[in-house]
Image (cartoon, rainbow, N blue to C red):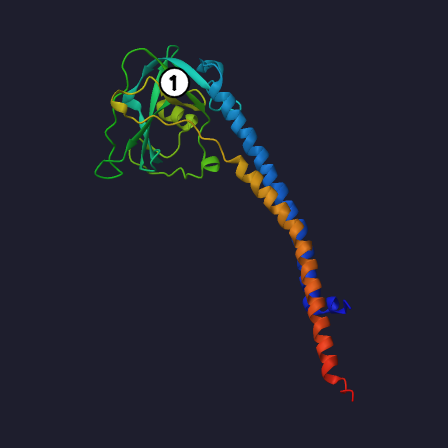
């Protein structure tokens, strides 16, 4: 009755179904792992953003690598901006996906060490990308800056190539080690995304808080894959029963045609 299952077509179909089930189960676990990773990341970001501000010197120092737990922590620093040695970071976008620059200004602390401060985004409104853009001046004198601590940018982490031969005072990545070499100074590891004081005239445009990753979507995908894996054997059984029914009906019709008529 089920001898058709030994046909080439059904053997291949059965093997494909047997391969799909563990593959879909594994994909479901992978999506659940991504859900857990994103949930943990969102919690880390939330904890960092809601933590009390601390002096930047408590979390970083020259040569220090900012850790995952230190990322996004609110820090304060007292000193003065050094706009004469600031640079702009190329190919950065704002909240509206407009391409421009980030303004990276050295902030000299009271002990002489330097903190890199990303003062925000400005548009690329120059005649060409080789021209240094017009950058609004930072506050003068000794002030207190507040911002979110960030790790050094690398090509591996960001996917941004650190190009050589750029125009003067333009960089691709924010990297404290490279800036320490350029400035000839002791530079704190990582950098700070400025949140206060707010700039005059709303420019540079301050960089917004990081958004939550959509962990719930990964959770939904995991459930979806597991439902698919459960649906494969159900679908296989339905196809088998349909094939058996069609074959039985065909056999009966063939028998009816071949049986002699009774008088």
49 lies left or right of 142: right
State which quadrant residue 256 falls in: bottom right
Give the percent coordinates (x, y) of residue 252.
Answer: 73, 76
User: Where is 179 relative to 92, above or below?
Assistant: above
Screen quadrant of the N terminus: bottom right
At 75% across and 67% down in the image, what residue appears?
Answer: 6
Give the percent coordinates (x, y) of residue 155.
Answer: 45, 37
**Residue reaching furthest front?**
263
Give the percent coordinates (x, y) of residue 21.
Answer: 67, 51
Q: Nearer the viewer, residue 259 or 159?
A: 259
Question: Crowdedness of circle 1 by 10 Å Cα count: few (<14), some, many (20+)?
Answer: many
Give the percent coordinates (x, y) of residue 13.
Answer: 67, 62
Screen quadrant of the C terminus: bottom right
User: Where is 18 relative to 116, above or below?
Assistant: below
Q: Nearer the viewer, residue 124 or 182?
A: 124
Q: Is residue 23 visible?
A: no
140 lies left or right of 172: left
* Residue at mark 1: 114
187 lies left or right of 14: left
State which quadrant residue 261 falls in: bottom right
Secondary structure category for the residue under label 1 = strand
User: Where is 186 relative to 212, above or below?
Assistant: above
């Amino acid at each position: 009755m089920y001898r058709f299952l030994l046909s080439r077509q059904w053997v291949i179909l059965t093997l494909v179904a047997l391969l799909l089930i563990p593959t879909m189960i594994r994909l479901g676990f992978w999506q659940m792992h991504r859900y857990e990773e994103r949930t943990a990341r969102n919690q880390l970001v939330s904890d960092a953003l809601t933590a009390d501000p601390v002096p930047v010197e408590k979390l970083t120092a020259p040569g220090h690598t900012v850790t995952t737990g230190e990322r996004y922590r609110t820090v304060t620093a007292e000193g003065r901006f050094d706009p004469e040695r600031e640079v702009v970071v190329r190919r950065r976008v704002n909240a509206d996906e407009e391409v421009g620059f980030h303004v990276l200004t050295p902030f000299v602390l009271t002990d002489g060490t330097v903190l890199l401060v990303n003062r925000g985004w400005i548009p690329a409104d120059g005649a060409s990308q080789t021209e240094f853009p017009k950058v609004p001046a930072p506050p003068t004198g000794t002030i207190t800056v507040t911002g979110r601590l960030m790790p050094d940018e690398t090509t591996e982490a960001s996917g941004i190539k650190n190009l050589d031969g750029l125009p003067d005072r333009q960089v691709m990545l924010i990297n404290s080690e490279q800036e320490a070499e350029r400035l000839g100074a002791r530079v704190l590891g990582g950098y700070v995304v400025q949140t206060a004081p707010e700039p005059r005239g709303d420019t540079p445009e301050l960089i917004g808080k990081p958004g939550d990753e959509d962990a719930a979507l990964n959770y939904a995908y995991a459930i979806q894959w597991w439902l698919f894996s459960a649906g494969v054997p159900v679908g296989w059984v339905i196809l088998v029963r349909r094939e058996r029914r069609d074959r039985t009906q065909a056999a009966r019709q063939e028998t009816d045609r071949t049986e002699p008529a009774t008088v």
